[in-house]
Image (cartoon, rainbow, N blue to C red):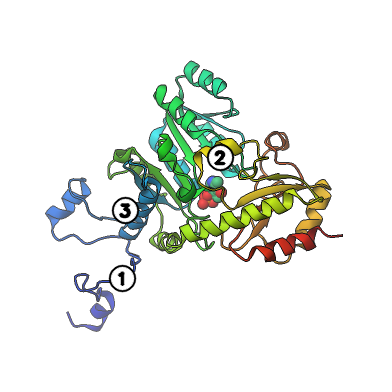
């Protein structure tokens, strides 16, 4: 092999002699086989190995294994994880992998806006109905589950966006188990550093890794973690849904999540510390009508949060005394913090749910769930807390 265009086309490296310290980005759509026989064994799931990056990719697998280890750490539960192209892809692949036409999802009205839309606008027309209820009312939940065998999945989010409402994971997971149904939780706000749903018997955990797990706002990806490991292996129902629907994560995005995960614990400590200080500051400010932070004893779900979280995270929301008008004025005067529709980054972000994240949710449902016109959501960063408080003070000033 010595012709110019052959040298151009061939791979130059010998994988047996390269030993990178840092996880490499395997940006390869397919993987080479030693022989025909080996190829057949891998293709038919008889031997572990890589075939094609939509099926599995070494970078993606390594990062997924790390997230599974974080969720399982210290719980004694064996878990597996998969990564997807977004948090939404994680939720939809889980639903495709475990539910079928005629099954129902029982969930709360105050989910992340995109999840409610996904259930209602995409899965409902495919014959998977969604029932919304208040998951705090455990008697009502039990009644619904007991009397409707079609409810196959209890789906919850705790703390929920943007009011930080929390639900009792142990009670809901036990109820699901008792009646032979699945439970799933969106653990994006808490991360496994603050809350490990496997401890409470929850079957499936979804993450938008786009948020705190990455932490730097430079990738979009999602994760699904479960103790039902067989469904996640090659040939399992969730793996099959990912492979065929093509909801897999790119190795580049996975690598960025991996970079962010290295500092998750130290970032979360600072997010929590700053958020608590700011929640206490807001609670005592005369311009503020109400603060939603599940770490404050005044939060209606503080006792639930205390039972299942080790600290309360970086998210909070609040309502200014002047309602919508005061909210808009405040948002336009913010200087140090940034107006951006995401969360979980190292810098402080502010959002107005009624005009941004919850724009597509009907007003009456929004109001029922405490998302009023003047509500402001903050994702507290890891900057010096005085700079954040200084910005709030100047933006609320006369
Ligand atoms: C952002 C978010 C999602 C959706 O994740 P994407 O990565 O944007 O698809 C789901 N749940 C929560 C709580 C979120 O904050």
Mark 2 Cα-neighbour bin, 10 Å: few <14, some 14–19, many ≥20: many
Between disc 2 and disc 1, the foreground one is 2
110 vs 219, left or right, is: right
Quarter assignment of residue 397: bottom right
On the question of residue 102 being in view, the answer is: no
Q: Is residue 300 left or right of residue 177?
A: right
Of residues 27 and 260, the one drawn nearer to the viewer in this rendering:
260
Residue situated in front as seen by the camera: 200 or 178: 200
Residue 356, position in %: x, y? Answer: 68, 50
Which numbered marker is on residue 21?
A: 1
Gap between marks 3 and 1, in whole Å?
22 Å
The residue carrying mark 3 is 56
Q: In the rendered view, tell whether residue 23 sits above or below residue 94.
A: below
Q: Taking 4 as reference, is 379 left or right? A: right
How far apart in space, not on screen, are marks 2 and 3 (Cα)? 36 Å
Residue 86 showing in the rendered view = yes
Image point (43%, 64%), residue name: 259
328 sits to left or right of 169: right
Give the residue drawn at x 65%, y 42%.
163
Residue 377 in picture, x, y percent from top left: 67, 50
SS under mark 1: loop
CA neighbours of label 3 inside 10 A, class few (<14), some (14 to 19), many (20+): many
* SS class, disc 2: helix
Question: At x 65% / y 55%, what residue is drawn?
Answer: 277
Q: Label for residue 244?
A: none
User: Upstream in the sequence, badge 2 or badge 1?
Assistant: 1
Disc 2 target residue: 305
Q: Quadrant of the N terminus?
A: bottom left
Q: Residue at x 58, y 62 (%)?
A: 382
Specify whether tag 2 is near ligand 1 (CB below 8 Å): no
Helix, strand or loop at mark 3: loop
């Amino acid at each position: 092999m010595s012709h110019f265009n052959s040298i151009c086309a061939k791979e130059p490296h010998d994988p047996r002699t390269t030993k990178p310290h840092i996880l490499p980005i395997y940006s390869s759509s397919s993987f080479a086989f030693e022989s025909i026989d080996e190829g057949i064994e891998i293709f038919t799931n008889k031997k572990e190995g890589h075939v094609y990056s939509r099926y599995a990719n070494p970078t993606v697998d390594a990062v997924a294994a790390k997230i599974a280890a974080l969720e399982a750490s210290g719980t004694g539960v064996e878990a597996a994880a998969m990564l997807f192209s977004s948090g939404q892809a994680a939720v939809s692949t889980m639903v495709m992998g475990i539910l079928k036409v005629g099954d129902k999802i029982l969930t709360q009205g105050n989910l992340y806006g995109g999840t409610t839309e996904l259930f209602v606008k995409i899965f409902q027309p495919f014959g998977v109905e969604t029932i919304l209820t208040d998951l705090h009312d455990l008697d009502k939940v039990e009644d619904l589950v007991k009397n409707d065998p079609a409810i196959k999945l209890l789906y919850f989010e705790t703390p929920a966006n943007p009011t930080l409402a929390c639900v009792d994971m142990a009670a809901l997971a036990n109820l699901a188990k008792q009646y032979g149904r699945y439970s799933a939780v969106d653990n994006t706000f808490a991360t496994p550093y603050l809350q490990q749903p496997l401890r409470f018997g929850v079957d499936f955990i979804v993450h938008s890794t786009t948020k705190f797990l990455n932490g730097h706002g430079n990738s979009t990806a999602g994760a699904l973690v479960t103790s039902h490991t067989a469904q996640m292996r090659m040939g399992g129902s969730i793996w099959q849904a990912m492979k065929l629907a093509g909801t897999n994560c790119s190795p580049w995005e996975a690598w960025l999540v991996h970079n962010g995960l290295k500092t998750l614990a130290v970032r979360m400590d600072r997010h929590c510390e700053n958020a608590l200080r700011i929640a206490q500051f807001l609670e005592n400010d005369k311009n503020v009508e109400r603060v939603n932070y599940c770490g404050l004893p005044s939060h209606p779900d503080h006792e639930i949060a205390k039972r299942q979280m080790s600290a309360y995270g970086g998210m909070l929301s609040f309502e200014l005394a002047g309602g919508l008008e005061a909210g808009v004025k405040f948002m336009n005067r913010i200087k140090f913090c940034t107006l951006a529709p995401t969360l979980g980054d190292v810098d402080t972000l502010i959002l107005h749910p009624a005009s941004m994240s919850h724009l597509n949710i009907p007003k009456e449902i929004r109001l029922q769930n405490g998302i009023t016109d003047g509500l402001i959501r903050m994702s507290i960063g890891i900057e010096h807390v005085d700079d954040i408080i200084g910005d709030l003070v100047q933006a609320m000033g006369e």
